[in-house]
Image (cartoon, rainbow, N blue to C red):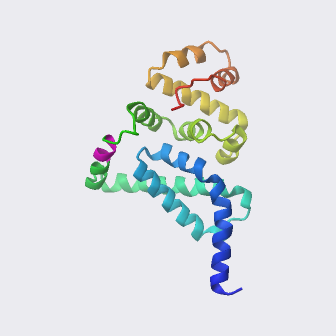
């Protein structure tokens, strides 16, 4: 195969795997970074790195996990850089000002994202994957590399913290009246209206 044909074959194989997971991956990125421009940057940077390292992917079924791993590393590196170089950034401040004028970004969503940012990393990721991105528990388990009961525990504990942060008395009442985390999980995951749906 010639160089252009190999490149085209790689593009087609990459797109065949990426297109079906784009929507949940985009929701994951949006929930992790709060601003639509930052989410688009994270998606773009992740897709670029994933494409560049696509040949290193051994199991095509693990493609979504591959994307999450890259996105998570990008966020960690940016966080480290931000700590080193300081907190204030004029372009970021201007973008935040513009986002605050964006009608699609409601106050409730902003409060939710701010509360999510206060959760421990594993709980935040479990909630984002399960509640916001819509992944099944088994998928969250595979992504986080833990047991199914650990995923349920992270979701329940994260929701408890969110309920306290957001002063959601209804969710707190439901959670506190169930004896075990398993029962709490079943109760909150079957509710029609959960605080995290928007």
On-image quarter of the N terminus: bottom right
Give whichever of 116, 11 is nearer the camera.
Answer: 11
Question: Main structural element of the magenta stretch: helix, strand or loop?
Answer: helix
Residue at screen point 53% across, 38% down: 124
From where the camera sits, is residue 2 visible?
yes
Q: Position of residue 136 (x, y in %)?
A: 69, 39
Is 33 positioned to the left or the right of 179 in the image? left
Q: Which residues are magenta?
A: 96-100
Q: Position of residue 128 (x, y in %)?
A: 56, 39
From where the camera sits, is residue 56 visible?
no
Give whichever of 69, 94 is nearer the camera.
Answer: 94
Is 147 positioned to the left or the right of 105 in the image? right
Q: Position of residue 95 (x, y in %)?
A: 31, 50
How many marks on residues?
A: 0
> Does the stretch in magenta take in 107?
no
Position of 86 relative to 7 (above/below): above
Residue at screen point 66% across, 54% down: 20
Is 66 positioned to the left or the right of 98 in the image? right
Give whichever of 42, 56 is nearer the camera.
Answer: 42
Residue at screen point 49% across, 35% down: 119
Residue at screen point 42% across, 48% down: 36
Q: Residue furthest front?
A: 103
């Amino acid at each position: 195969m010639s160089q252009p044909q190999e490149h085209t074959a790689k593009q087609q194989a990459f797109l065949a795997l990426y297109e079906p997971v784009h929507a949940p991956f985009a929701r994951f990125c949006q929930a992790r970074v709060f601003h639509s421009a930052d989410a688009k940057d994270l998606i773009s940077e992740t897709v670029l790195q994933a494409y560049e390292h696509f040949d290193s992917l051994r199991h095509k079924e693990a493609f979504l996990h591959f994307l999450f791993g890259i996105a998570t590393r990008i966020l960690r590196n940016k966080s480290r850089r931000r700590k080193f170089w300081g907190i204030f950034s004029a372009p970021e401040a201007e973008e935040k000002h513009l986002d605050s004028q964006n009608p699609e970004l409601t106050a409730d969503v902003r409060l939710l994202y701010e509360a999510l940012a206060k959760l421990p990393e594993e709980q935040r990721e479990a909630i984002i994957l399960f509640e916001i991105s819509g992944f099944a528990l088994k998928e969250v388990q595979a992504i986080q590399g833990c047991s199914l009961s650990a995923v349920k525990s992270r979701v329940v504990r994260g929701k408890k913290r969110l309920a306290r942060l957001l002063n959601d008395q209804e969710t707190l009442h439901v959670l506190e009246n169930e004896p075990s985390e398993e029962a709490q999980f079943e109760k909150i995951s079957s509710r029609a209206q959960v605080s995290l749906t928007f």
